[in-house]
């Protein structure tokens, strides 16, 4: 197939990850090698930057800075949570692409982003505007369908499991006063992240002692019983709970309508699920409970990233660009586990529209029968993804050095966008 | 001086740190070399283990495990928050020491522990029971007087500043939806930890944009003004706040009695200061605010410890034992900064009673004039303490491996302790 000549735009969407910049790094390196692709644009804050025509010129970045993207956490191009819905917005995206002769669109994100990319691709085709659209998988939640796992997940798994291991030692030492600890992890619908921390328990003694995921309803009676049992056996209890855990009625435990929505007086309670379960354990079980909420810290831990994850993210970016140059369009690159022992992972393709509509939950048998810790299957699945340490630059102030792009703006050519 | 013959007990107290085991490692290595010291006892959970006579035999641990203590976070001997007050408790401690011919007592902890050690030393002297008592400094809070800094502080400073740097990049990328972030740090009375994160801001763009410490009262008007100013300038705002921050009246912001004690209906509000400031920023400034609370995670981050801190903690332990063998007693080992460029640190001594009664706050000129970020002085003080990476063992599951002691119990010789 004759190479399609034109410019390319790269964009990142949704919650940042430790390795989404590694994907863009891989994609850029491949694009720079090609003779077909002319200008390399970054879209500031994902699809929002296309809509507002806030593009910047990636050829004006220093080559070493683009290389350093591989080891920079979060989304260096900027990200967004904007969901494109209106037809006029899709038209606008195509207008901006046409104005800048953009023939390649590389979008790193989750299913919403794949949905956007898919619709843009279809609109372009219907208007006979030749272009190639490729998706690059990204989500710490690991909930994309059609891929064995998602870039970003291995690093949050490794870092968070390490946090739990380390904070677990704190509870081991302090149980005479701080007897229990609850850690809240990300994962609104799927329990992959919370479950990954289960790997930190190499022996009965080790944290976490209990792991709760959104896929398995959590009643407060059950929680109290579990905590009491662990406390009786070990004298302490370390609990990991996903922010998306639900009660038997399907209500989020941390939100209005859940079991904690109101106190005894009917007053609405505020705060995260760690705070709430902590309060409950103190009142119901009668032991003091620490609450940790790593929040956005967990998904940006480049200083302890999984090398496997960094390399796979980089490979996904490279593959997306390489295949698009060969004529592929309308697909997301997937990760295919070819072997588990020793672990070997390649890439595949999934239709953007399929990914857009899929969601992958933690299989029931990745958890133990009781539904309060992981099974051997989960361990075998996740351990290869957490392996390896990645080298990064350290400053003379004892802290890591992560690159910042200059983001030199590209002259606008379209009228102003009205949201 | 003739070496005093007898057994030794080692104990750890208060909140764990990344490097308190490194201190015990150094102390044990020195004690093992000595001919004067016979048995090596660990007291389970600090002074509580002496009171309950729960001692364990450190000579029964594998030598390689004792070496590995240098790179294990938290307090491997167990810790406690028990404050010895009653005369009968001090008598009991001496009884246990006598029963086991304990002539050396090494206590790693903060000012309360130094107070206990001091009183035990004085009681022993008054009863003509010859023994040597030495304190080993430990506290992430860095608030011990008579020492330039405390083992444990450098590592929490390095790790937390890195967390802030990394989570800061998340806010940089997501500002169009998650515009502000508040991170709560430890430090109930002193702002050293919160201030240390200020180093992560190498340029105006970098997090943290605002840093609040307990030493400088924080009014809500001030907070709102500061956040608005940063938001206007950068489009986002990243705030670090010490858990011990107080309002103009001296009330803890996160506790009953503080400005957030009750909502508009007079209902008591629950949760940490990050939750509360987050709520305030959302309501008052009108921008969405993320809340992170690393909690006990921050003080156990051996996977990203400061090598300087590890080595100094180890040196404090070694020095305490070496000096006690030479006849020193009733002192805590201190860290003395001999030079700053290049950094050079040695040890000194401070009387246990002096340390017990002192507390070291963040000097006003370690913060900027506005009191909302650090000054050059703070940076110069803290950077050398964060430098260097420490090597640790990695498992084949992609996670660190930290030693666990066997803790073989020693036969009890005293009657039961009644608290």
Image (tube, coloured by chain):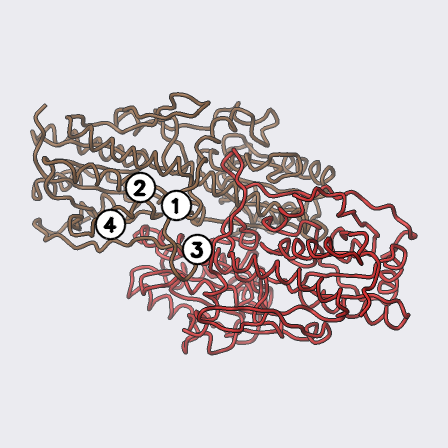
Chain colours: A red, B brown
Chain identity of mark 1? B
Q: How far apart in space, not on screen, are marks 3 and 1 (Cα)? A: 15 Å
The answer to whether mark 4 and mark 2 are in CB contact below 8 A is no
Q: How far apart in space, not on screen, are marks 4 and 1 (Cα)? A: 16 Å
The residue at which mark 1 appears reads as B391
- The residue located at (45%, 38%) in the rendering is B187
Q: How far apart in space, not on screen, are marks 3 and 2 (Cα)? A: 19 Å
Q: Are marks 4 and 1 on the same chain?
A: yes
Q: How far apart in space, not on screen, are marks 4 and 3 (Cα)? A: 22 Å
Residues packed near mark 4 inside 10 Å, few (<14), some (14 to 19) or many (20 plus): few
Task: Say if residue A377 shows up in the picture.
Answer: yes
Q: How far apart in space, not on screen, are marks 4 and 2 (Cα)? A: 14 Å
Residue mark closest to the camera, 3 vs 1:
1
Q: On the image, which quarter does residue B95 sit in?
A: top left
**Secondary structure at numbered mark 3:** helix
Q: Are marks 3 and 2 on the same chain?
A: no
Chain identity of mark 2? B
**Residue B231 coordinates in the image, percent (x, y):** 71, 40
Residue mark closest to the camera, 2 vs 1:
1
Vertically, is A316 above or below B347? below
The residue at which mark 4 appears reads as B64
Chain identity of mark 4? B
Q: How far apart in space, not on screen, are marks 2 and 1 (Cα)? A: 13 Å
Residue mark closest to the camera, 4 vs 2:
4
Of the numbered discs in the image, which one, if any, rests on residue A162? 3
The residue at which mark 2 appears reads as B22
Task: Say if residue A262 shows up in the picture.
Answer: no
């Amino acid at each position: 197939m004759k190479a399609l000549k034109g410019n390319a735009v790269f964009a990142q969407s949704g919650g940042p990850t430790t390795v989404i910049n590694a994907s863009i790094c891989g994609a850029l390196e491949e694009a720079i090698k090609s003779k077909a692709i002319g200008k390399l644009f970054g879209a500031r804050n994902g699809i929002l930057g296309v809509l507002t025509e806030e593009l910047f010129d990636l050829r004006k970045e220093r080559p070493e800075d683009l290389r350093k993207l591989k080891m920079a956490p979060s989304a260096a191009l900027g990200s967004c949570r904007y969901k494109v819905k209106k037809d006029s917005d899709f038209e606008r995206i195509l207008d901006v692409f046409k104005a800048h002769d953009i023939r390649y669109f590389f979008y790193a994100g989750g299913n919403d982003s794949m949905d956007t990319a898919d619709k843009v691709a279809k609109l372009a085709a219907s208007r006979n505007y030749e272009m190639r659209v490729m998706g690059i998988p990204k989500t710490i939640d690991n909930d994309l369908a059609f891929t064995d796992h998602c870039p970003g997940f291995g690093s949050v798994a490794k870092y968070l499991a390490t946090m739990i291991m380390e904070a677990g030692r704190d509870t081991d030492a302090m149980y005479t006063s701080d007897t229990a600890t609850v850690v809240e992890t990300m994962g609104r619908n799927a329990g992959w992240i919370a479950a990954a921390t289960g790997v930190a328990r190499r022996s009965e003694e080790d944290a976490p002692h209990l792991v709760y995921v959104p896929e398995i309803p959590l009643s407060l009676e059950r929680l109290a019983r579990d905590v009491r049992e662990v406390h009786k056996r070990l004298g302490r209890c370390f609990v990991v709970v996903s922010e998306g855990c639900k009660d038997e009625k399907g209500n989020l435990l941390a939100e209005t309508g859940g079991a904690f929505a109101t106190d005894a007086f009917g007053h609405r309670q505020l705060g995260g699920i760690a705070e709430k379960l902590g309060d409950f354990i103190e009142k119901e079980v009668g032991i003091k409970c620490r609450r940790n909420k790593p929040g956005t810290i967990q998904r940006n831990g480049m200083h302890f990233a999984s090398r496997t994850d960094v390399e796979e993210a980089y490979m996904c970016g490279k593959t997306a660009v390489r295949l698009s140059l060969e004529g592929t369009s309308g697909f997301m690159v997937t990760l295919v586990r070819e072997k588990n022992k020793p672990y070997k992972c390649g890439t595949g393709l999934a239709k953007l529209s399929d990914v857009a509509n899929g969601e992958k939950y933690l299989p029931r048998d990745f958890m133990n029968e009781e539904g309060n810790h992981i099974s051997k299957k989960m361990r075998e699945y996740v351990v290869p993804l957490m392996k390896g340490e990645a080298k990064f630059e350290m400053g003379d102030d004892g802290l890591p050095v992560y690159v910042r792009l200059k983001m030199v703006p590209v002259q606008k050519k379209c009228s102003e966008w009205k949201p």
